[in-house]
Image: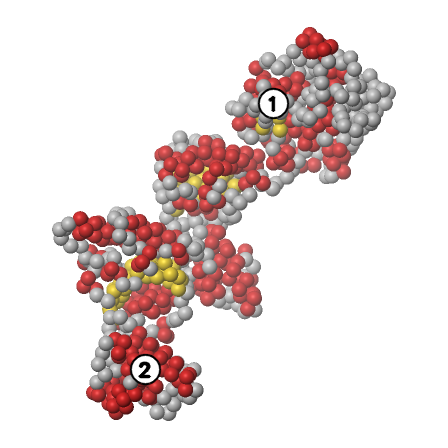
Amino acid sequence: MTYTTDTDHRGDTDTADTDHRGDAHTADTHHRGDAGISGPSAVGHVVSTGRGAAADGADPLWGRLRLVEERVRHAVAARRAADPDPDDPYRGQYLTPEAVERILDEPGVLAVPGYEPPPPPPGSALGALAARFGLSPLDTDLLLVALAPDLDARFERLYGYLNDDLTRRRPTVGLALELCGLPSASAARFRLSPGAPLVAGGLVEVTEPHRPPLSRALTVPDRVTAHLLGGTEPDARLAGALGETGDDPTADADEVGRAASAARSGTGLVHLLDRGGDAPGLAVAALRTAGLPSLVLDAAAVTRRPGDVPALARVAALEARLTGAGVVLGPLEALPAEPAEQARTLREFCAALRGTPLFTHGRAGWDPAWAADTPVVLPVAPPSPARQAARWRHALTLAGAGDRVHGDADVLARAVAAHRLDGGQLRRAAEAAVRGAALADRPLCPDDLRSAVRAQNGAGLARLARRVEPGVGWDDLVLPPQVHRRLRELAVRARHREQVLGQWRMRPGGGRGRGVIALFAGESGTGKTMSAEVVAADLGMDLYVVDLSTVVDKYVGETEKNLERIFTEASAVNAVLLFDEADAIFGKRSEVKDAHDRHANIESAYLLQRMESFDGIAVLTTNLRANLDEAFTRRLDVVAEFPVPDAAHRLALWERCLGDRLPRAADLDLRFCADRFELAGGSIRACAVTAAYLAAESGEPLTMRQLVSAVVQEYRKLGRLVLESEFGPWTRELLTES
């Protein structure tokens, strides 16, 4: 079918000819008695050569557009009939005195025949749009008048002619009313006011606010035009603000049902209180259950565009209503930290999306200042171990793991059971793990999953603490069995905390978090920091060492603020947080004698409260356990005492630190070193490194003389005397050399 206009009342197929003029793109009709338009339409040709006239329900749009063209035809004919010189090439660029008189004498509106077009079918794009935006038949006509130049370029020239201005090729408010057969002074003009469905919904934009109301031009956003033509790409103005959350296929059916019912009730505003679960995945699953697609907005991206928030909210509302989608916005903690700015941002979105299902999610509760409406608040609990394993199986299947899964997928899931991941992080981790295994051309193993999960950590905590990627394991530790058991217990608590503290509620009430906190106490060099690194490696996590220089501040209250930032970031990443020399900030409270004591006690009291609500994994190390406040002990889950190693452990440490790559001379007697030199593991490691440098300089295997020389250097560094009872036959020779 070719889109044409019936011209039986004329003997030719007159077109909008612009011959003989190089500067005027008007609807010139030389040698004709009217301003008729005929011939194939460019847009109609697209329809006829595409998927058929009724493809995708687009036919009603073109049928209504033909009616708009007929009305334009009548308007042009009426205008030409009243124009004494319709073929003037400079028409629209000046007014003659006769034209002024004619304007003063003409009625308020040209007589354009009215018509009553049938409503568009509900299943068509135009019908669905009218239903979603609450458009009346007049609103639909006004929209099509404004839309016509975007579908057929001839309307630009025709509108320029009807506007009596060659440069104004869009319909004005007055012209749109005229083409609908309505007088400019009628109440219908308010169908294009800011609060009317067309303008408030974003379907039509009234531009040129400096002009009188009837002379303002009407435009239709590109996204609306694309939607009516079958386009599905989101509005380009949302670029960078869209998230990629998928629904959680393992979400509890009851939770999904409650969320879907909440989205369908009242204003459709639902706040998901994230308690460690997959809140955005639950929101998408609830919308899918309600039969709605999802429009996911990244709150962090919205924050990066503070000046565009009102416009962004309107565009998001337009996109959601065009597609019939619900909106998911979060996490709310990514919004501006300033309360007033945060409230302003949320008020803009809640107001623009009122009546559209809107899910917000975040770790904080809902503030009434954020919106005029009160949301339905639903907590989102962490997934059970069985659900977490199901999530991993699903994500690995989507990532194309296939035959690359080494053993049961549940075994892989248990390897990262201590990690808290939302749906997007879990999906990206699964994809990264599968790619890593494919590049190495081997089956997927737990180490692939651990590395991929660590890569999901953000850089927020790295700005506040030093990141250490674990490079040691349980075999590298030389510790008494009871210390080993305490470290294993810490790993077990971290791995099963969601089941014990979440499902079984073994730490209820009081705002208590689900964190695991351990204290490693012992002399310097006994392996406390290395043990924390081993635990982090066993859990597949990074270790973040808190730098006290970035925490302690001389100004009152600043230390607490720095610690709060660290605790907040640590809760959001999958990592082990290490407070080395913790007694510097976790010291005892004392009797208040002056302002300094009072503020020091406030700092300790803050830490006691914050540790109670901490959700992460933290290790405190100290050389002086007696300096810690006793109130901290009650809040500790694991306490490990690191003793100075005995002779047997020192021998194992010498063997471990020297390794199997360093060449050894025949006279090397490590048993002598272990029995005579009472050194901690850190000092033994320092001696081994110094001896290795001496051996490298000599170009020979490591000798006993070089090793004992390294021990002498370590003794002097520690301020210890070199006694013959310890060094035996090496004493006199080494002292002579030094």
Q: 306 or 263: which is nearer to us?
A: 306
Res 50 seen here: yes
**Spot occupied by residue 707 in the image (x, y as percentages of width and height):** 33, 85
Q: Quadrant of the N terminus?
A: top right
**Spot occupied by residue 245 in the image (x, y as percentages of width and height):** 50, 48
Q: Amino acid at mark 1?
A: Arg
**Spot occupied by residue 339 in the image (x, y as percentages of width and height):** 36, 39
Residue name at image x 22 percent, y 78 percent = 720
Classify residue 524 by image quadrant. bottom left
Does residue 679 appear to the left or right of 405 in the view shown? Answer: left
Name the image colouring: secondary structure
Above-or-below relation of 92 to 650: above
Marks 1/2: CA distance?
88 Å
The disc, 1 or 2, on the residue closer to the chain's N-terminal end is: 1
Residue that mark 1 sits on: 216
Q: 161 or 595: which is nearer to us?
A: 595
Above-or-below relation of 103 to 667: above
Q: Quadrant of the C terminus?
A: bottom left
**Spot occupied by residue 557 in the image (x, y as percentages of width and height):** 27, 48
Q: Which mark is residue 710?
A: 2
Above-or-below relation of 278 to 517: above
Number of numbered discs:
2
Query: Quick one: label 1, few (<14), some, or many (20+) residues within 10 Å?
Result: many
Residue name at image x 53 percent, y 68 percent = 443
Residue name at image x 41 percent, y 84 percent = 697
Does residue 451 appear to the left or right of 205 in the view shown? Answer: left
Secondary structure of the residue carrying numbered label 2: helix
Q: Nearer the viewer, mark 1 or mark 2?
A: 2
Residue name at image x 42 percent, y 45 percent = 334
